[in-house]
Image (spheres, grey):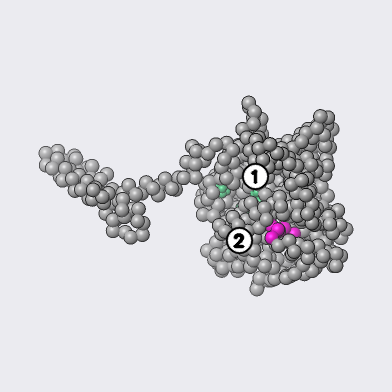
């Protein structure tokens, strides 16, 4: 018998049975309140043509959709091991949560990682470690080249770009207040400077994307006047021109009319309740020299604040051109942020996320080596972002030449992200990546901002401990030779060999 026939037969038998029993025991009719809706669902399933499973398996077909809906939770709570789970595995999620809550972050009984598996990485320690308390406990870097009049004394770990819009109002507030408490910087993301970025009085890196939100003319071009008005605010410490991000390089965006509320429109300098496009390219320049003149223009308009740009490396030839343009125009950015193909986003097309853009370590080592080749590295600080969740993650990027690190998803976890992977649905269950006011209310700013500062403080503490163990005293002493990578069952290769300067 086919499932449809089983359903029809069972429904008829059940109704006849209830009708029969009801002739001598009336209360049985109440059971119809339970069975009739199920029978109606089954009939509807057989009539509808959209879902084959429901059509072929009336009623029970729904369980497939139910299990599918809970798949991420089932996977996360019951199936995955500590070292599985993507994008962030359970081991690192737990580490972030315990550091954010200032709880015990030690591990018992030894490593859970398979140290003989290809891909395993470690740092070389020294027989003569340094005394940790003799090292600078709050390592910082000065960002600002020869043309910069207001260099920024930056932490080596800051909050990576995430806009108000992708994140909720309370998430932005918690991040910003956390940055203020911990003495580090908060990147606004390309959605402009919202009141929630200003309320906490944390240092800001204002990101200027292709939509020029917060500095645009009515037809979507760059506007000097509004840029000047916003950039001169005291909290704005640096400006980052966004060329691309690793999760969706070369992809523009659209802010749909329905999401373009009065509040968002005011922040972004656009008309409310209209579709607003961010093209994949900048209108203010279209080649390497143009980019340098734009850097120069923004630096002048900001009275000499540090200006940099962010990209995920794609075409290497284009980056060579950028270096040549720096030499020709005698202008260079104060910093360059390198994002990797493994980078995060609120929402991106699958192919763009999976299959475009150089992974961080290749992109970063290439940029650092190229800047050195053109004798530009001393002038420009290089910042890296991409899956940094522990101090070792920071160290291995610094070994490749990064001066500083940005973290987006680590900071989201510090304010309560549970990796439910609903950021693109407006249904984030913990109020981090949603504009739904009732979901956002659950995120208590006063509780969570302290966690952001704790997470930063504890990861930096661990960073300094690792430096001391390796016999180093400062982050700029970390070299490629300090990191080893397993390439085979009996072969560990240093980053020096693995990322040999090829430029
Ligand atoms: C929710 C979300 C929103 C983001 N928004 C932006 C953005 O507005 N501009 C940008 O350059 N990058 C954006 N990113 C990318 C991050 O700034 C960062 O470069 C990337 O996620 C890699 O860092 P991570 O591995 O620490 O998350 C966003 C990432 C996330 C998760
Ligand atoms: S918990 Fe919220 S922010 Fe975190 S992954 Fe899920 S939807 Fe995104």
Q: What is the distance, in whole Å, between disc 2 and disc 1 at their CAs? A: 26 Å
Residue 224 appears in the figure: yes
Query: Residue 61 bears which disc, if any?
Result: none
Image quadrant holding the C terminus, namely bottom right
Residue 234: image location, x then y, percent: 77, 55
Residue 450 appears in the figure: no
Question: What residue does disc 2 label?
Answer: 264
Give the SS element for disc 1: helix
Q: Quadrant of residue 272?
A: bottom right
Question: What residue does disc 1 label?
Answer: 410
Q: Which residues are magenta?
A: 309-314
Residue 37: image location, x then y, percent: 28, 49
Please, is residue 493 above or below residue 372 in the view?
Answer: above
Neighbor class of circle 1 (other Cα within 10 Å; few <14, some 14-19, many 20+) is: many
Q: Nearer the viewer, mark 2 or mark 1?
A: 1
Please, is residue 114 above or below residue 268 in the view?
Answer: above
Q: Is residue 312 magenta?
A: yes
Q: Earlier in the sequence, mark 2 or mark 1?
A: 2
- Residue drawn at point x = 62 percent, y = 64 percent: 252
Give the SS element for disc 2: helix
- Residue drawn at point x = 75 percent, y = 44 percent: 495
Q: Is residue 93 magenta?
A: no
Q: Residue furthest top?
A: 109
Residue 494: image location, x then y, percent: 75, 42
Q: Quadrant of residue 165?
A: bottom right
């Amino acid at each position: 018998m086919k499932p449809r026939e089983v359903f029809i037969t069972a429904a008829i038998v059940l109704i006849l049975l209830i009708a029969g029993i009801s002739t001598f025991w009336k209360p049985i009719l109440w059971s119809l309140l339970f069975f009739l809706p199920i029978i109606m669902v089954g009939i509807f399933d057989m009539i509808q043509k959209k879902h084959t499973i429901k059509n072929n398996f009336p009623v029970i077909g729904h369980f497939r959709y139910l299990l599918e809906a809970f798949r991420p939770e089932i996977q996360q709570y019951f199936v995955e091991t500590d070292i599985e789970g993507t994008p962030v595995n359970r081991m690192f999620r737990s580490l972030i949560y315990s550091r954010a809550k200032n709880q015990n972050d030690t591990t018992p009984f030894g490593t859970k990682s398979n140290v003989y598996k290809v891909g395993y990485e470690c740092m070389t320690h020294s027989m003569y470690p340094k005394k940790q308390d003799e090292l600078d406990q709050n390592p910082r870097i000065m960002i600002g080249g020869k043309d910069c009049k207001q260099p920024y004394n930056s932490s080596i770990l800051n909050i990576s770009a995430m806009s108000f819009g992708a994140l909720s109002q309370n998430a932005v507030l918690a991040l910003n207040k956390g940055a203020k408490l911990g003495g580090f910087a908060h990147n606004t993301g390309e959605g402009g400077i919202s009141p929630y970025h200003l309320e906490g009085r944390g240092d800001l890196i204002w990101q200027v994307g292709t939509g020029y939100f917060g500095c645009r003319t009515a037809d979507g071009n760059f506007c000097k006047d509004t840029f000047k008005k916003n950039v001169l605010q005291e909290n704005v410490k640096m400006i980052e021109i966004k060329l691309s991000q690793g999760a969706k390089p070369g992809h523009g965006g659209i802010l749909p009319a329905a999401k373009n509320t009065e509040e968002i429109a005011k922040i972004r300098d656009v008309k409310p309740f209209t579709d607003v496009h961010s093209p994949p390219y900048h209108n203010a320049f279209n080649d390497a020299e143009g980019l340098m003149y734009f850097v120069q223009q923004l630096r002048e308009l900001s009275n000499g604040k540090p200006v940099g740009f962010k990209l995920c490396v794609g075409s290497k030839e284009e980056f060579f051109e950028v270096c040549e343009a720096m030499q020709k125009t005698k202008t260079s950015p104060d910093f360059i942020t390198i994002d990797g193909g493994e980078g995060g986003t609120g929402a991106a097309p699958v192919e763009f996320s999976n299959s475009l853009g150089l992974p961080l370590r290749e992109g970063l080592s290439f940029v650092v080596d190229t800047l050195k080749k053109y004798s530009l590295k001393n002038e420009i600080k290089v910042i890296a972002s991409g899956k940094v969740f522990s101090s070792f993650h920071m160290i291995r990027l610094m070994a490749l030449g990064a001066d500083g690190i940005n973290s987006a998803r680590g900071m989201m976890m510090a304010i309560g992200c549970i990796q439910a992977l609903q950021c693109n649905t407006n249904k984030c269950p913990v109020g981090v990546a949603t504009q739904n006011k009732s979901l956002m209310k659950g995120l208590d700013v006063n509780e969570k901002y302290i966690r952001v500062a704790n997470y930063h403080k504890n990861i930096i503490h661990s960073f300094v401990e690792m430096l001391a163990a390796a016999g180093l005293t400062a982050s700029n002493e970390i070299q490629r030779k300090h990191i080893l990578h397993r390439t085979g069952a009996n072969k560990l290769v240093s980053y020096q060999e693995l990322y040999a300067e090829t430029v």
